[in-house]
């Protein structure tokens, strides 16, 4: 695991954008794994800025897989992760919506949705580089504490803490869906390169537990210690609890 403390969220955005661009330059048909939430936004904005300035690689051949999706939102809801990823990143990079995949929470097809999503990822050849944020409780994607370290894509119930954390996107915790379809920890570990970003003091304890604590389902992000190629980018507040 490569742990990289940086001076600011801006430096993290540049470093993350450099990593993504180098993967896409090396492999124009790269498969990118995308996360939602606030953490990756500066990096996404930097990628779009470079793309618009004409200094980025072509994304024409790239395929994307989102980490997770809420269950129960009406199709096209602006807070769905499909809509969020399009708005925050892929539209800006000119990646066509049919190359951006997400877990499909269509209620009629919920059973088997996990297996179908895993099959799509496998058919694309697996994820080359996976963006990850971390929850204040150590969750990775929506694998909350207690999730099996070998878990696969499936439905999960959000904890009250995570619904509270995500209420800022909705208005109130009550409006945050109770369930999500999320890639499992075992699924995430199959990506070839994992890129975790942790910024802000609210992430300091979780980041320290993930990087330096025991590998345990009580901090799902600690599973990253089992992967051979992980880069962790931290700002000073996010790194504050590291030894
Ligand atoms: C989002 C996701 C979540 C977030 C985490 C941190 O797709 O999988 O694990 O990465 O909840 O969220 P932010 O970045 O908003 O603090």
Image (spheres, rainbow, N blue to C red):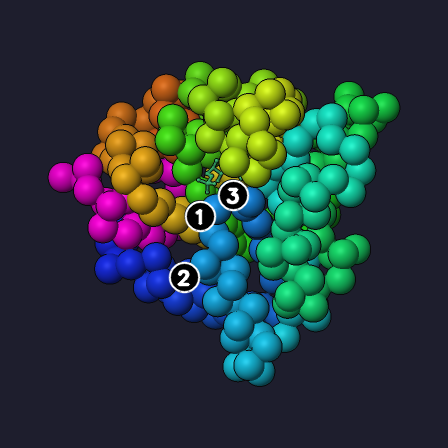
Is 238 on the left-hand or right-hand side of 182?
left
Is 183 on the left-hand or right-hand side of 211?
right
Q: Residue furthest bottom?
A: 54
Question: What SS does tag 1 mark?
Answer: loop
Circle 1 is placed at which residue position? 39
Q: Which residues are drawn in magenta?
A: 224-243
The quadrant of the image that shows the C terminus is top left
The image position of residue 236, as x and y in percent, is 22, 50
Q: Is mark 1 within 8 Å of ligand 1?
A: yes
2 or 179: nearer the eye? 179
Q: Tell me the residue at 34%/47% (across/down).
A: 199
Res 90 → quadrant: bottom right
Residues under labels 2 and 1: Cα distance? 10 Å
The answer to whether the residues at label 3 and label 1 have Cβ atoms under 8 Å apart is yes
The image position of residue 70, as x and y in percent, is 66, 31
Q: Tell me the residue at 26%/32% (across/down).
A: 205
Say whether disc 3 or disc 2 marks the residue closer to the N-terminus. Answer: 2
Q: Tell me the residue at 69%/62% (across/down).
A: 91
* Residue 21 visible (yes or no): yes
Q: What crowding class fits label 2: few (fewer than 14 Cα within 10 Å), some (14-19), or many (20 or more)?
A: many
71 or 160: nearer the eye? 160
117 up-or-down from 5: above or below: above
Question: What SS does tag 3 mark?
Answer: loop
Q: Is mark 3 within 8 Å of ligand 1?
A: yes
Circle 2 is placed at which residue position? 13
Say whether disc 2 or disc 1 marks the residue closer to the N-terminus. Answer: 2
Res 179 → quadrant: top right
Look at the magenta stretch and give its main secondary structure: loop
94 up-or-down from 140: above or below: below
The image position of residue 235, as x and y in percent, is 28, 52
Circle 3 is placed at which residue position? 37
């Amino acid at each position: 695991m490569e742990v990289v403390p940086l001076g600011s969220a801006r430096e993290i955005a540049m470093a993350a954008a450099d990593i993504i661009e180098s993967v896409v330059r090396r492999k124009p048909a790269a498969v990118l794994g995308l996360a939602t939430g606030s953490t990756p936004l500066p990096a996404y904005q930097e990628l779009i800025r470079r793309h618009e300035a004409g200094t980025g690689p072509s994304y024409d051949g790239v395929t994307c897989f989102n980490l997770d999706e809420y269950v129960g939102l009406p199709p096209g809801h602006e807070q769905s992760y499909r809509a969020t990823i399009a708005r925050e990143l892929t539209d800006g990079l000119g990646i066509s919506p049919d190359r951006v995949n997400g877990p499909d929470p269509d209620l009629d097809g919920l059973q088997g949705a996990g297996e179908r999503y895993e099959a799509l990822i496998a058919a694309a050849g697996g994820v080359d580089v996976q963006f990850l944020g971390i929850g204040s409780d150590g969750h990775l994607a929506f694998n909350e504490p207690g999730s099996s370290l070998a878990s696969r894509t499936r439905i999960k119930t959000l904890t009250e803490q995570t619904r509270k954390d995500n209420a800022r996107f909705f208005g109130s915790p009550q409006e945050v869906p109770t369930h999500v379809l999320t890639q499992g920890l075992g699924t995430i570990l199959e990506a070839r390169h994992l890129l975790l970003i942790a910024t802000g003091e609210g992430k300091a304890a979780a980041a320290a537990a993930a990087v330096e604590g025991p590998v345990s389902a009580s901090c799902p992000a600690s599973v990253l210690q089992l992967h051979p190629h992980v880069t962790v980018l931290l700002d000073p507040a996010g790194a504050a609890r590291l030894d």
